[in-house]
Amino acid sequence: MNKFAIIGTGPAGIEAAATLAAHHNEVDIYEQENAPLGNIRDKAFLFPNFADADEVAGRLLARLDHPLIHLYTDKGIDQLEETPDGGWSVNGNTYSRVLLATGYRTFDAGRKEELGYGIYRGIRSSLEMEQMLREQKITNANGDKPQRIVFLQCVGSRDEKTGNLYCSKLCCVTAVKQAIETRKLLPDAEIFIFYMDLRMWGQHYEELYRQAQQEYGIRFVRGRISEAGGTYDGRVQIKSEDTLMGLPLKITTDLLVLMVGMEPSEGTRRLAGQCHICGDYGFAQSIDPHTDDNRTAHRGLYVAGACKRPMTLTDAIADGRSAAVVMLAEG
């Protein structure tokens, strides 16, 4: 029986562990936080079908209920290195194969100083908006129901200033999902989405975009916000340009939601750097993104999920399963 280690308990790590255990292999899975599941714990509903995130998380968590899977929480990785016999050592424990599934973190919107995040209480991140949606209570800076909400796309993605030139892949559809959920809670509010361009690439995503316009009255404005500031009464004043009309815009809103992108987690950056598999922007790098996307330059070390690049929950689960199959094939 082989013994495998998985670092990270997001959807990719959990699916990989379950697949390996189903084939009669012992798996130790490490999580630096005090609970598994990663970023899905912060979600209310999932696109594109508004599935209950807690219900999906429960199904994922049940995958760890296997006698061959040993979950270790509050376990940061202090040591990860190859052993002379071709195996790997993780925190002093020896394994035949190791999978990095260390995931992502959300962009710190405070780095975009012109957008006023952390300065004005009426400006929230999409992560904070998701928490309000979980609680089914959306409030402005004064604790009241907002009458106008603006969502801003591409905060920390496709941005030379922050150094993140890549698309985070999820922000467009997440904004549409959150806007629809907001409409259900606040039927009389004005809701706007400011975007560079809409990348509704997934199955049923385009339909969700059309539904947002036609059924829920969400207004889409093509343009970037150049500046956001506070008003005396706690509202937010926005300066922008409608690039379709070629006109400058100034709008006052009760709530500005910044759709923050994805970056490699601290654990991803550190461990990928330590193992010399750090690729573009600090993500972990596989041998080839087309034909060999789970193995790395080191024998016995594999990668899966959003530690490689922005991924949806569905993609991460599939990638974790794929990594497990590759690990099994190599013994």
Image (tube, rainbow, N blue to C red):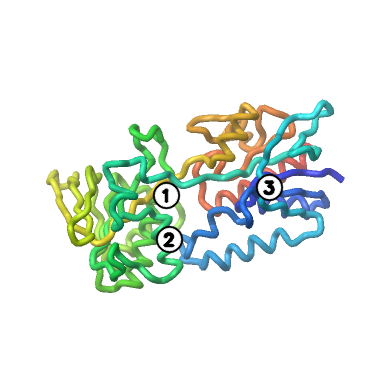
Q: CA distance from mark 2 to mark 3?
A: 27 Å
The residue wearing badge 2 is 130
Residue 331 visible? The answer is no
The residue wearing badge 3 is 75
Residue type, label 2: Glu
Does 232 sit left or right of 167 as displayed? left
The residue wearing badge 1 is 201
Q: CA distance from mark 1 to mark 3?
A: 37 Å
Q: Label 3 neighbourhood size at 10 Å, few (<14), some (14-19), many (20+)?
A: some
Q: Quadrant of the C terminus?
A: top right
Residue type, label 1: Trp
Residue 140 visible? The answer is yes
Pointer 2 or 3: first along the chain: 3
Residue 188's spot in the image, x, y percent? 25, 73
Q: What residue is shown at x 81% (from left), y 55% (from top)?
A: 68
Picture quadrant of residue 36: bottom right
Camera-nearest label, 2 or 1: 2
- For label 3, the SS is loop
